[in-house]
Image: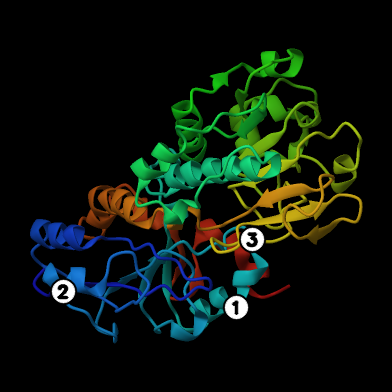
């Protein structure tokens, strides 16, 4: 390259605003040292976890106008009115599952002929995600599940994660927590689930197999993690096959209910395809043997497989109750008959400095270099939802959604 390749770090515009950023001040310097033709500028922000002054001290300029940038990087969805025409954007767009609340943003992206790369779909050739905040979502989600339990049982009190200085401070607060014989269930096996496991393991909670979990009574806290092979089965009666599940999720039905009958706290960490069956129904939740009283829905798919997740919650107001009898939301902890829900969709934002540094390391090592090497492995290509405003082949199934049909 002979000209500067300018990267702009966006100010987060989604409400509620997220405090994370894709690159810390030190990582901006590292990126420019590694690639001398790269220049990073930062849009000023009063709420970002790294202060504007920290970027200035690192020699990174602040610029309100990012029109001269070639690549604009954010974290969460970008407010449609702030989108700059004919630019390259990279952020978590949350449109690939046809999310209704982001339709207007995608339509504006198309109208302004914007190229959109979604972090969620940046993968290796075999489909493994390269960059995500999953571990931190799992960590904070599991912690919030424990917060709910402490409030419900009135046996301990945990600070909100965002009031902890960092991850080590969060873990130190768990040292004095003594759980009653509660049963915790994690769905999923990726980064999110492993983040949740990290927290529960730090507390020394005993882990059991799915068979033990379903068939055994325990007089101490226990933890179980399950994969799709445990909670769905094929409609054709054949044995579960992972490749078939990935390609044909609609050809399965849920077998989750036995777990719902023995679980107190569900920590949902799975990846869900909108074609896959729901875990359970609203009618199932009215059954006398439906035992789950707390759901930490880290996956947070709306509408999705967990019917009590009526909406996302926020870091400021993280919990609400679902009344199964009336099928409606009520105030958190308002009735013992209700299910308490946590559905924060930006959980890593509760530990923003830790999460941002973690994310930036991967971005520098595994993602950004592909912009300078011609993307030989198709890393950027697989994450590109629109190219100059037009849906790419991989995301052509979104056409009816984009056209609001």
Percent x, y for residue 378? Answer: 35, 51
Judge depth for marks 2 and 1 and give the one in front.
2
Q: How far separated are the C-alphas under marks 3 and 2?
A: 35 Å
Q: Secondary structure at mark 3?
A: loop
Residue sitting at x 35%, y 69%: 48
Mark earlier in primary sequence (3, 2): 2
Which residue is labeled 1 in the image? 104
Q: Is residue 272 left or right of residue 235?
A: left
Mark earlier in primary sequence (2, 1): 2
Q: Is residue 271 left or right of residue 86?
A: right
Front-most of 168 and 370?
Answer: 168
Which residue is labeled 2 in the image? 56
Residue sitting at x 28%, y 65%: 50
Front-most of 47 and 110?
Answer: 47
User: For the N terminus, which image quadrant?
Assistant: bottom left
Count of numbered marks:
3
Q: Quadrant of residue 353?
A: bottom left
Q: Quadrant of residue 179?
A: top right
Q: Can residue 65 be seen in the rendering of this structure?
A: yes
Which residue is labeled 3 in the image? 312
Front-most of 72 and 371?
Answer: 72
Q: Is residue 15 above or below residue 235?
A: below
Mark earlier in primary sequence (3, 1): 1
User: For the C terminus, which image quadrant?
Assistant: bottom right
Percent x, y for residue 86? Answer: 38, 81
Q: Quadrant of residue 295?
A: top right
Q: Is residue 326 left or right of residue 336?
A: right
Percent x, y for residue 346? Answer: 50, 58
Residue sitting at x 66%, y 19%: 210
Q: Is residue 381 above or below residue 52?
A: above
């Amino acid at each position: 390259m002979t000209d500067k390749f300018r990267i702009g770090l966006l100010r987060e515009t989604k409400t509620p605003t997220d405090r994370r950023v894709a690159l810390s001040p030190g990582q901006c310097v590292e990126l420019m040292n590694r690639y001398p033709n790269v220049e990073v500028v930062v849009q000023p922000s009063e709420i970002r976890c790294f202060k504007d002054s920290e970027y200035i001290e690192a020699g990174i300029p602040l610029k309100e106008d990012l029109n001269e940038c070639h690549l604009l990087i954010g974290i969460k969805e970008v407010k449609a009115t702030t989108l700059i025409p004919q630019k390259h954007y990279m952020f978590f767009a949350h449109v690939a599952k046809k999310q209704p609340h982001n339709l207007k943003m995608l339509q504006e992206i198309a109208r302004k002929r914007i190229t959109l790369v979604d972090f969620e779909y940046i993968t290796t050739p075999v489909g493994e995600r390269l960059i995500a905040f999953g571990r931190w979502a799992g960590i904070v989600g599991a912690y919030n599940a424990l917060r709910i339990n402490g409030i419900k049982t009135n046996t301990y009190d945990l600070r909100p994660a965002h009031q902890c200085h960092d991850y080590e401070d969060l873990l130190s607060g768990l040292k004095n927590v003594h759980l009653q014989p509660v049963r915790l269930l994690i769905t999923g096996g990726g980064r999110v689930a492993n983040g949740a496991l990290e927290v529960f393991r730090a507390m020394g909670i005993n882990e059991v197999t799915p068979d033990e979990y379903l068939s055994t009574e325990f007089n101490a806290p226990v933890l179980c993690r399950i994969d799709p092979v445990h909670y769905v089965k094929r409609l054709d009666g054949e044995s579960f096959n992972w490749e078939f599940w990935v390609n044909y999720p609609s050809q399965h039905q849920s077998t989750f209910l036995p777990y719902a009958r023995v679980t107190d706290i569900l920590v949902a960490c799975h990846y869900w395809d909108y074609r896959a069956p729901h875990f359970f129904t609203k009618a199932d939740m009215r059954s006398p043997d439906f035992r789950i009283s707390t759901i930490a829905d880290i996956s947070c798919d709306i509408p999705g497989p967990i019917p009590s997740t009526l909406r996302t919650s926020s870091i400021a107001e993280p919990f609400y109750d679902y009344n199964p009898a009336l099928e409606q939301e009520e105030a958190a902890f308002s009735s013992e008959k209700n299910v308490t829900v946590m559905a924060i969709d930006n959980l890593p934002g509760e530990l923003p400095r830790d999460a941002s540094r973690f994310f930036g390391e991967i971005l520098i090592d595994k993602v950004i270099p592909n912009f300078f090497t011609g993307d030989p492995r198709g890393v950027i290509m697989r994450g590109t939802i629109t190219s100059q405003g037009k849906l790419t082949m991989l995301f052509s199934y979104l056409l009816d959604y984009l056209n609001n049909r």
